[in-house]
Amino acid sequence: MFLRNYWYVAASAAEVGRKPLGRMILGEPIVFFRTEAGEAVAFEDRCAHRHLPLSMGELVGDVLQCHYHGLRFATDGHCVHIPGQEHIPERAKVRTYPVAERYHWVWIWMGDPALADPDKITDFHWLDDPNWGAKASYLHVEANWQLVVDNLLDLTHLAFVHGSTIGNTALAEHAKVKVDRSPTTVAVTRWIIDQEPPPTFKRVGNFAGNVDRWQIVDFVPPAFLRLDVGATPTGTGAPQGQRVGGIGMRNLNAITPETETTSHYFWGQAHDFDVKNAELTDKIFEQIRTAFLEDVAVFSAQQRNLNIFADPPQLDISADAGVIAARRILARLHDEEQGAGTFVAAE
Ligand code: FES
Ligand SMILES: [Fe+2]
């Protein structure tokens, strides 16, 4: 199940250059490149002649030349040159996709191009805001995108999966949890009051004693999860809105389906303390990366089982409240898109 009328992160800005980049998104092969003026372009990665991936080709100025028989395609997808032939048939063109660049990421619109409004791109400003230190990266994941969403909406797993970094048992046993739902969003708020900080927080926060820790997960469809996380010395007022003497971070996640069973996982970590300290930014990033590799091992193992057992029965526990709410929203949005698609097709 894919949702199409959304902006997705397709690549880091640095990945898209003058060498064509082939990448599958929502099951569709796409090629990305940059014009000489620096504008990102996306085509279907399939030549209109004999289907060779255009990502095997090369740029000649701003036109992409197919590696096989040399047809050339301009940035609007139209063929502008066929070797040894004057006439260029009208059908000689490749599909193009709307793209936009924000927060050091190249975004792609996978649905109806008429609906592609860049103002609808989900806010990830922490990645390029001078008031934050931040570093972003990418993981290829052998799991369905919704398993990654589930993972980030139930943070009790930190206690078991991430004991050496961002987790400890206090998280699963002593959290006050609230789930807020709107028709299109879910927010899971967890407070862990007067507990020992987890290892990563000790390493980067220099806490002397217990802390009040928050984890506020903000889910926006199809697969954006922005986590407001941090801790302050216990009793200094963070639950009442006064965050002093501690650390605040944003864990930022943009998951893009590659296929039904694999995903592109774009993520970043931003921090609001000592923001110009690149060494600290790296240190925090490495801690979170260690944790995320533990997550990748978990959801790829889940996917391996799901590849064996088709739609097996599963058990819900109270920690799943946010996960279930998000899955309901996604199922409804999918139904609505399918319904709208039928309507358009019938016209
Ligand atoms: S397959 Fe591209 S030019 Fe022939
Ligand atoms: Fe995790």
Image: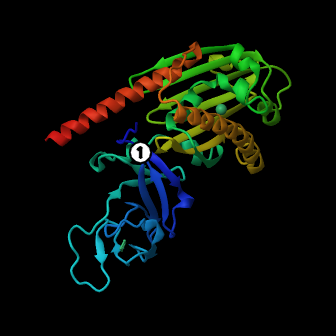
Residue that protrudes farthest toward the right in the picture: 208
Regarding residue 279, the answer to whether it shows in the image is: yes
Q: Nearer the viewer, residue 81 or 230?
A: 81
Q: Amino acid at mark 1?
A: Trp
Q: Residue at x 33, y 46 (%)?
A: 111
- Relative to residue 215, is residue 71 drawn left or right? left
Q: Give percent across and percent down for residue 247.
A: 72, 32
Quadrant in the picture for residue 170: top right
Regarding residue 225, the answer to whether it shows in the image is: no
Q: Secondary structure at mark 1?
A: strand
Residue that protrudes farthest toward the bottom in the picture: 84
Q: Is residue 300 above or below residue 83?
A: above
Image colouring: rainbow
Q: Quadrant of the N terminus?
A: top left
Q: Nearer the viewer, residue 52 or 295?
A: 52
Q: Residue at x 80, y 30 (%)?
A: 199
Q: Residue at x 53, y 41 (%)?
A: 254
Q: Residues within 10 Å of mark 1 (few under 14, many from 20)?
A: many
Quadrant of ligand 2: it is top right
- Relative to residue 33, is residue 127 drawn left or right? right
Residue corresponding to mark 1: 7
- Relative to residue 317, is residue 165 drawn left or right? right
Q: Give percent across and percent down for residue 112.
A: 29, 47
Q: Is residue 54 above or below residue 340?
A: below
Q: Is residue 188 above or below residue 80?
A: above
Q: Give percent across and percent down for residue 245.
A: 76, 28
Q: Residue at x 22, y 67 (%)?
A: 91
Q: Quadrant of the C terminus?
A: top left
Q: Give percent across and percent down for residue 18.
A: 50, 70
